[in-house]
């Protein structure tokens, strides 16, 4: 049996941070072999990202809505994005924690 290849911490962080920033959470977890957690993070990230993007685009197209409706749409989009950014930070730190525990 071949020796197990050592994963690189900088690559774990890079795979967690860059794709996670644009909406694809869990890639760092996939690299670490945590497929279940990575899949859940990927689905949750996309479930939050897509409605936030739709709300933002709808709010930005305020010519179709009155100012109050546009403001509500934009604030809802920003609230979803703030939650997703918090999840992004947590998932990056979680990938680092898993790396340090296992490797």
Image: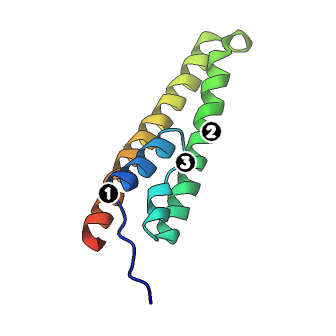
Q: Is residue 61 above or below residue 43?
A: above
Q: Quadrant of the N terminus?
A: bottom left
Frontmost residue, 50 versus 79: 50
Question: What is the distance, in whole Å, between disc 1 and disc 3 at their CAs?
Answer: 19 Å
First in sequence: mark 1 or mark 3? 1
Instruction: Determine the CA span between mark 1 and mark 2.
Output: 32 Å
- Please name the residue that numbered disc 3 is placed on: 24
Instruction: Answer with mark 1 or mark 2, whichever residue precedes in sequence.
Output: 1
Is residue 26 visible in the rendered structure shown here? Answer: no
Q: Quadrant of residue 32?
A: bottom left
- Classify 25 as above or below 61: below
Left or right of 95 on screen, residue 28: right
Res 51 visible: yes
Tell me how far mark 2 sits from mark 3, CA to CA.
14 Å
The residue singled out by tag 2 in the image is 51
* 58 and 98: which is toward the camera: 98
Q: Which of the 4 quarters of the picture holds residue 66?
A: top right
Residue denoted by label 1: 9
Do the numbered discs 1 and 2 sit on residues whose CB atoms are within 8 Å? no
């Amino acid at each position: 049996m071949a020796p197990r290849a050592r994963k690189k911490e900088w690559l774990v962080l890079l795979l967690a941070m860059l794709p996670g920033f644009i909406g694809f959470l869990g890639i760092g977890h996939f690299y670490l072999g945590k497929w279940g957690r990575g899949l859940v993070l990927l689905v949750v990230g996309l479930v939050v990202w897509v409605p936030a993007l739709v709300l933002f685009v709808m709010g930005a197209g305020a010519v179709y809505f009155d100012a109050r409706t546009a403001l509500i749409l934009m604030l809802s989009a920003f609230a979803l994005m703030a939650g997703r950014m918090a999840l992004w930070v947590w998932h990056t730190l979680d990938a680092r924690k898993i790396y340090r525990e296992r490797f």
